[in-house]
Image (cartoon, rainbow, N blue to C red):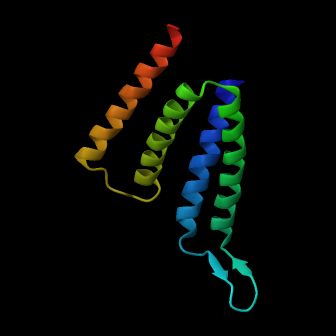
Amino acid sequence: MQYLMIIIYIFFTTGGITLMKMGGDSLRLTLSDGFALSMGWKTFAGFCFYIISFLLWQRLIVKYDLSIMVPIVNGVVQLVILGLGTIVFREKISTVTLIGAFVVIAGIVIMAFGTQSR
C-alpha cells in the first residue's frame, strides 16, 4: 500500500507541476473591484492535482518514516520532472544537470539499500 500511495503521489505532484507550466501565466487575481480569481483550465487542473498531492503527502509523512520518505520521494519527483521537462517542454539537459541527476539517483539507491539493512 505504501508504494501505491507513493506512485499516486508522484503522479499527482508531477502532473500538477506539468499542467501548471502548460497553463502558462493564466492565473489572474483582482482585488480592485472586489475579489476575482480566474485561471485557464490547464492551470486549474494542475492546481487540483497539486491539492490532491498535498493531501497524499500529508498522509505519507504521518504514516511512514519522515527521514526516509522525504529524501527518496522528493528525489524521484525531481527526476520525473527532469524527464517531463525534457520530453514535454523540450528543455535542454546540460552536463551539470545530468551529473546532478546521477548524484540524486545514487542518493536514492544508497538510502533505499540503507533502509533495508535496519
Q: Is residue 92 above or below residue 107?
A: below
Is 105 on the left-hand or right-hand side of 64?
Answer: left
Q: Which quadrant: the N terminus?
A: top right
Residue at screen point 66% across, 40% down: 57
Q: Observer-nearest residue: 82 or 89?
A: 82
Q: Observer-nearest residue: 25 or 64?
A: 64
Q: Is residue 109 above or below residue 37?
A: above
Q: Residue furthest left?
A: 95
Q: Quadrant of residue 111?
A: top left
Q: Quadrant of residue 29?
A: bottom right
Residue 97 image position (x, y, % from top left): 30, 46
Q: Residue furthest bottom?
A: 33
Residue 90 image position (x, y, % from top left): 39, 58
Residue at screen point 59% across, 40% down: 10
Is 80 on the left-hand or right-hand side of 102?
Answer: right
Residue at screen point 62% across, 74% down: 27
Is 28 on the left-hand or right-hand side of 93?
Answer: right
Residue at screen point 44% across, 40% down: 79
Q: Quadrant of residue 16?
A: bottom right
Give the number of callouts: 0
Residue 63 image position (x, y, % from top left): 70, 27
Q: Residue furthest top?
A: 117
